[in-house]
Amino acid sequence: MKNLFLLFILLAFSQKNVFSQKKDTLFFKLNPKCIDVKKNYEGVHSFIIKDEEFVTSAFNEIVKEDLFFFTQADFPPKTYKLKPIKIYKLKKFIKENRHMLKEKSTNKLDAYKIMEFFDKYVVFFKKEKNTFIKVRVHTTLSE
């Protein structure tokens, strides 16, 4: 009986660790040459990658993705004062990881794969010096 109780306690703590894992964080610069920044009437930012066509493989067939962008994660809009060690350029980061993020038959970026990839991270875009906006991927699947 004592062993059963210890096993139960061990399982309870191991389950807690599985569900309370923290995500890594990625920080990106906003380059106006590569990213189009929009702000709606509520002050929520949207970040659209310029000069890219997207497809999605989420529906077991490859279709064009017309709705892909990053959007501000917090509502009401919130900024964070942060001092990250490394800040990436979004276009360069995607280019370097394109082999994981593209749909092989079309060689275009796959919005579904990008969404899955970035869902593993907490993502921030740099707005101003040490001021960041938390973002998330928004696609047709998000609708």
Image (cartoon, rainbow, N blue to C red):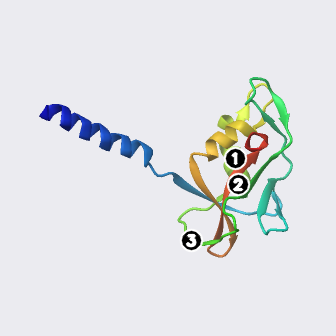
> Could you say where residue 67 lies in the image, as x and y percent from the top left?
83, 45
Please indicate whether residue 5 sits to the left or right of residue 83 in the image: left
Q: Nearer the viewer, mark 1 or mark 3?
A: 3
Q: Is residue 96 above or below residue 45?
A: above
> Could you say where residue 11 lies in the image, as x and y percent from the top left?
30, 37
Q: Which residue is mark 1?
A: 94
Q: Which residue is mark 3?
A: 82
Element carrying mark 3: loop
Say few, some or many: other residues with alpha carbon within 10 Å of mark 1 (under 14 / 14 to 19 / 20 or more): some
Please indicate whether residue 2 sits to the left or right of residue 106 in the image: left
> Could you say where residue 87 lies in the image, as x and y percent from the top left?
61, 62
Q: Is residue 87 above or below residue 112?
A: below
Q: Earlier in the sequence, mark 3 or mark 2?
A: 3
Say few, some or many: other residues with alpha carbon within 10 Å of mark 2 (under 14 / 14 to 19 / 20 or more): some
Residue at 77 percent across and 33 percent down: it is 56
Q: Earlier in the sequence, mark 1 or mark 3?
A: 3
Residue at 65 percent across and 68 percent down: it is 132
Q: Amino acid at mark 1?
A: Ile
Quote the CA–CA distance across marks 3 and 2.
18 Å
Q: Quadrant of residue 112?
A: top right
